[in-house]
Structure formats: structure tokens, C-alpha cells
Amino acid sequence: MRATLALVCLTLAGCTASGEPTTRLPAAPTAAAPALARTAHGEALDESVPLTELSEIVAEPERFRDRVVRTEGEIARVCQRAGCWMELRAPDGPAVRVPMAGHSFFLPQDSAGRHATMQGRVQIRELSADVREHLESEGAQATASALSIEATGVVIDDAAPARAPHATL
């Protein structure tokens, strides 16, 4: 009971389950757009890892198997129980499962529709029927694909979604 209460207090205070505070980062302003507030979750992204288009990873997952990638897209869905996974999609592409590395951090459950940049290791492994059923009970839809990216860090643009989150893929 005390552990659950502590987790709720940490979450309300803006901390992750590990007790580490989430970090607000200013987005780099451009001539066309003012700076946006951004929130970092998990480990800091390594800017030396080149940004790879999510559509490239989806098109050739074997090429990226077991590699650490940095990619970006729109958050299509987030686990509605704990925020322990998201589904990230490129424009007009399928969503990719993105579990948070070993439940080491969690995302806000209202993040769908926002832009995210993330870093993690590309995994290709089929889900068991039990795992698929569990994820679907939390709202997941991208459970048929063996492709996932195990996130070590995620940065979410805090601006309100420009449009409603995708209802179907």
C-alpha cells in the first residue's frame, strides 16, 4: 500500500517510478516556429546517433535488428494502465510498438497525437498469444508485427495535438 501511494505521489509530482524527475527541454526555435516545451522521459537521447526515418525501419526491419536507433513520429497510442508502451507512427505508415525499457520509465497516458523523438534498440520477435492479449487489453493495436523498438529515452513535444489521435491504423 505504501509503495503504491509513493508511486502515485511521485507521479503527481512529475517524477518517474524510479524517482527521477521528468525533464522539460526547450525545443530549438526556428524562423518559422517559436520554441515548444518538450518533456524528456527515461535516459537522455544521444545526439550522436543519427536520426533514422521511422518509415525506413518499418520497411527494412532486419537491416536495423539489434541496432540502437534514434527516430521520431506521432504517438498513436499509449498504454492506458501505466504508460509503459506507446505506438509510434510515421505519416501514413503503420504504428510500431515501443515498450519503455524494462518498465524503467513511463509516459503520460494523454500523449497520443503528440510528436515524439525516441531512442532505443530495434527488436524483432513474435509476441505470444498471452502477451498480445495483455497488450490489447491496455489499448494496443500494433500487436501483429514482430517489430518493436525498446525505448531507453523519449522526448515529447508538449504542444497540444494538432488533430485528434488516430482511431484506427
Image (cartoon, rainbow, N blue to C red):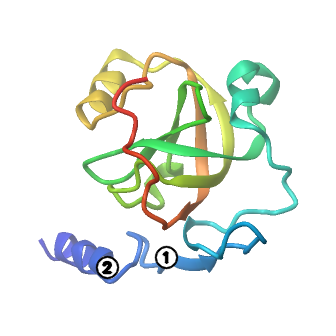
Q: Residue at coordinates 65% horizontally, 76% vertically from top-left? A: 35
Determine the residue positioned at 86% across, 50% down.
50
**Foreground disc of the pair 2, 1:** 1
For the N terminus, give its image quadrant: bottom left
Left/right placement of residue 131 relative to residue 70 reads: left
Q: Is residue 14 above or below residue 100?
A: below
User: Identity of the amino acid at label 2?
Assistant: Leu
Q: Is residue 151 left or right of residue 13?
A: right
| Residue, disc 2 | 10
| Residue 65 visible (yes or no) | no
The secondary structure type at the circle numbered 1 is loop
Q: Which residue is mark 1?
A: 22
Number of other residues with Cα within 10 Å of mark 1, as a class: few under 14, some 14 to 19, many 20 or more: many
> Quick check: 15 above or below 113?
below
Whether residue 156 is situated above or below residue 75 in the rendered picture: below
Residues under labels 2 and 1: Cα distance? 10 Å
Q: Is residue 136 left or right of residue 65?
A: left
Residue 24 figure quarter: bottom right
